[in-house]
Image (cartoon, helix red, strand yellow):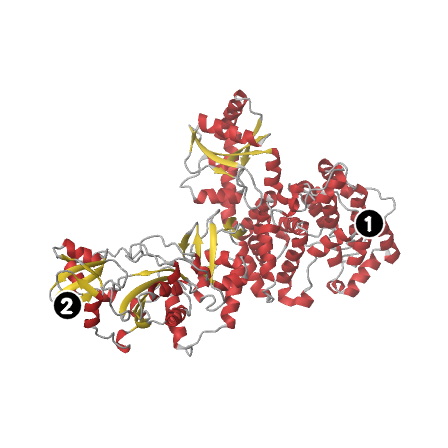
Amino acid sequence: MNVNASDLPAVPLVGRKPAPTPAEVSAAGLRRARARSGLGRAGFAALFAGGKPQFADALEPVVRVHRSHHPRADLPLLDRAYQVAEASHRGQTRKSGEPYITHPLAVTMILAQLGAETTTLVASLLHDTVEDTAVTLDQVREGFGSEVAYLVDGVTKLEKVDFGAAAEAETFRKMLLATGEDVRVMVIKLADRLHNMRTIRHMKPASQVRIAKVTRDVLIPLAERLGIQVVKTELEDIVFATLHPDEYAETRALITAREAAQAAGEDPLADFAGALRRQLREARIQAEVTVRPRHCVSLRRTRMHRAELAPTDFARLLVVVEENADCYAVLGELHTCWSPLPGEFKDFVAAPKFNLYQSLHTAVSTDPAGVVEVLVRTASMHRVAEFGVVALESPAARADESGGPARDELDRTDPARPGWLSRLLEWQRETPDSDSFWSALTADLSGDGELTVVTEDGRTLQLPVGSSCVDAAYALGEDVGHRCIGVRLGGRLAALSTRLKDGDVVDVLTEAEEQGGPAPEWLEHARTAAARIAIERWLADHPRDGSAAADAVVASAAALPQPVADRPVLDPSILPAPPETPGRERAAVIAEGLPDAAVRLARCCTPVPPDELLGLAVKGGVAVHRLGCPTGTGMVGGGRSAVRVSWAGDAEPGGYMVTVQADSLGRPGLLADLTAAMSAVGVDIFSATVEPPEELRVRHRYTVELPDPALLPGLMKAMLRVPGVYDVYRAVPAAAEGAEAAEAGAVENPDDRSGEGVRPSSGIHSTAAAFSDMGTGVPSPAPDLLP
């Protein structure tokens, strides 16, 4: 794979002028360089026009490798591109002193070894001509077609004279946009950077560190996402050697010592590979078993997880078979003849990685070799694992060379376009500032993989590993993210901070209109650049200051975590006290056998018609609870005498106190919306309490007076219609646990379902939903009672 400039045939230098001076970098200098080549305008035109080219000696190594992958390649076109590149760069040298043409030749050799088709090789030969010579993009388009011109333009750097310090960031933005249309742009850039890294020793130390860091933060993650492992691993090792020379030298010393031990006959992996070959032959499985040494960075990672490196840690076994079914047959032989290590098996054949990587990974314990890691894949899987998107080839090239139908375009761009690249292309439009773009780019590429989640309506979302529910909401659109008030994962409510796992089913719950918007705390949970940029922009456009209205303060307190002492509570002392109506209460409920006893409705469960009742004899009269009230039930268990009670048929309809509870997802303005909905029904609110949020879930308790008991179903229905409310039910208010509760002791309230998995109703989307009456003793309302 490694191609050094010294491996290429020397380019004749007879009759050449010295290297151009720095002044010749300008436009005038480029014109002088063209004149210095001796070709002039007519000579350049003749080169572009073609004729009968003869293969140059310097191009022969590239031609041989390219023919091995593409026997029917258009070699005269490749030779003509070399002639143009050689003439254009004539007189230019690299930092190493070598002729500049050695660089495009080496880049083209890398791409030829990857198996790239002819169009990509032509563009790689010409990739620096527009940037560093007098050749124009129009000339490239006229001589080699629009496809080659597009690739050359995609990798051409922007001038620092025009963009200043932002030139590098804007160049990468330009390449990403071009890669969105043709992924080969990034493939050429990766090959270009690989050769530059191979010769980085000729740069100044400060430049070496700067280039290595950019390669580490951007180019290596891009190579990983395109699946080009052979490029990624070599870039990793060179960056490792540049940024951490001492650790690199130490790792190389370990590898050298291991190689010496192998040469002396101490090679347990080779012995295990021989035993595995014999076993597979006996099982009649056609397979090729090879030992693949780890590269420096891989060994360094392994060493960080081992107390001491064993001889089998320096390499892994690769088993290449013919068909997918053979992969699992090999796995069966491995796990039958040797002991598999728990937790080490990974099936990337049935579930490929986001870059289309497929293999079976396992580790088995051997004696005396220790632990051996084994990869099992087919030959086609191996090509994709090594060369990534390049192994899928250009659709046009396959059609032209084989004469068969072209593959669908998605076959070429599948590792890139549907996932990470689509995200980059979306959020880069929202970052006109170069510094913000660069920071977002490096952050987005810093992840170590992707995961797939599915929405309840069947949409598939590709997100980086570590994404939260906030990222999923904004992946559905900025408007959806701003209106998000909660999520369900697998049908159960989850906090927005919850980290997503591959295969999760996500349902984003939204309010009808954008009211509160995202909270600043969401930035702590946002992993994707798109989500962070959208949240930051919204917060900048909607500053929150201390002069907001009281309702906004209360609503914000309900939406964000806070100490219990600071929770928003409507103090009952500032509201009118409920009227004392002992006469009406005596008229509302009849105690059989005790016509003169004082009857009062218990405040812990606030019974109203037509609740089923439980009467208890207490000092001074009869206390009436709802049937099933935990306080009443506890009093019966404590020895209280039960009294048969019933509702009076001629009781006055008004003046019944009732406590209802609403469970919701916190958002600004929720308290105001709930109280407005309740007032619209025609009830008077005597007290309201909002408990502190728990993972964005907020509980509201309201004590109201009903002018008519028949309004209770309508009240609960109206509360459930408020966006963000997912359950409404009768409850025991915490402040109303009086003497009865003290006598009965602490009894769990079955209406309090805080410990259960809360199941939101469809009312979260502002549509009709039946409220919960489980365990409340309130029968479901008749249809004619609902508004």
Quadrant where the N terminus lies?
Answer: top right
| Crowding near the residue tagged with mark 1, few <14, some 14–19, many ≥20 C-alpha atoms within 10 Å | few
Is residue 710 in sight in this rendering? yes
Quarter of the view holding residue 204: bottom right
Q: Is residue 111 left or right of residue 335?
A: right
Between 220 and 504, the one lying in front of the other is 504
The image quarter in which residue 740 lies: bottom left
Viewer-proximal residue among 9 and 474: 474
| Category of crowding for the residue at label 2, using alpha-carbon neighbours closer than 10 angstroms: few (below 14), some (14–19), many (at least 20) | some
Of the numbered discs 1 and 2, the one sitting upstream in the chain is 1
The residue identified by callout 1 is 14
In the image, what residue type sits under mark 2?
A: Ala
Please provide percent x and percent y for residue 509.
46, 59
Q: Which mark is residue 567?
A: none
The kind of residue tagged 1 is: Val
To which residue does mark 2 refer?
Answer: 598
Left or right of 620? Residue 218 is: right
